[in-house]
Image: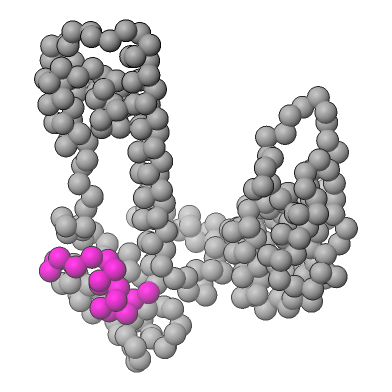
Amino acid sequence: MTEIRRRPGDGTGGLRHGTTTFESLREQAVSLRREGLSRRQIRDRLHVHNNDILNRLLDGEPAPEWTKRPNAKDDLRAKARELRLQGLTYDQIQLELGCSKSSISLWVRDLPKPDRQRNPEEASAIAKRGWERTLQLRENERQRAKEQASDEIDTLSDRELFILGVGLYWAEGSKDKPYERRERAIFVNSDPGMIGVYLAWLRLLGVEEEHMRFHVMIHESADVAGAEKFWTDFVGGDPTRFHKTTLKRHNPTTQRKNTGEGYRGCLVVRVLKSADLYRRIEGWWCGIVGAAAHHDPRNRT
């Protein structure tokens, strides 16, 4: 029998105090799901704020219909056919609905073609406006998908941040090689979000601020001073912990694509005297690999 122990504020979910069995909690979660509650409502009702536990509690239980996104293309198809029967061209339908002409073609190809009443210039202008509308709708859908996915994360427990940080380091941090010992925790990235998560992870591990050192790596033809100020402000620490910036020589025969206000080079985060930390990171990663292999349904009997 699996038991879930609750401590206030520990991020593991569960009751506010005491213990409860996983099976008992699952019965409550399944009952609420079948009543039509969403994941967020069940999470708040049972105070389960750990996504992994919530997934296990609801495993195999389908989401209620009201939480599912409708298939918008069914309505678009019907509207496209209606507009085609009114005599609109593919370009005009695209301008009206914002969907691609390839989709429109599939939806209405069995319907009669309208007579052409515009010259090539007018048709080209309509096609251009239709394509611009398609791109805008795609961008809107892209942003909605990102926002919805962001809301699904909610909060991170200490353990979730710990495991995330190990994977993050092993993907982007320096590695020790048999032919060249590099048992040092060095992390390099250009994404402020990535740097922010990594620094939060180091603090979770108890790495003190005075044991961190930074320096910027950037093209010499970029705004070096602006990048240095951005990263110093971002880290929010003592500027004396920043070492001299590394400049990448500019090749005049090639054109850099990483330009503009958003380009600030990379920030290098180095932890002093970090051989022991690096060895633990490598061990943690090996543990994650082994646990993932055990968790893989293909490896279960």
Is residue 109 left or right of 157 when viewed as pictured? left
Above or below, 100 relative to 57: above
For this orientation, the residue located farthest to the bottom is: 18
On the image, the x and y values in percent for residue 221 come to 81, 40
On the image, the x and y values in percent for residue 181 come to 83, 55
Q: How many marks?
A: 0
| Residue 275 visible in the current orientation | no
On the image, the x and y values in percent for residue 68 come to 21, 53
Instruction: Point out the image quarter for the C terminus.
Output: bottom left
| Residue 271 visible in the current orientation | yes
What's drawn in magenta, residue-wise? 34-49
Please say whether residue 16 is one of the residues in the magenta stretch: no
User: Could you tell me which residue is drawn at 42 percent across and 88 percent down?
Assistant: 8
Residue 45: image quadrant is: bottom left
Above or below, 240 relative to 193: below
User: Could you tell me which residue is drawn at 34 percent across and 88 percent down?
Assistant: 16
For this orientation, the residue located farthest to the right is: 244
Residue 255: image quadrant is: top right
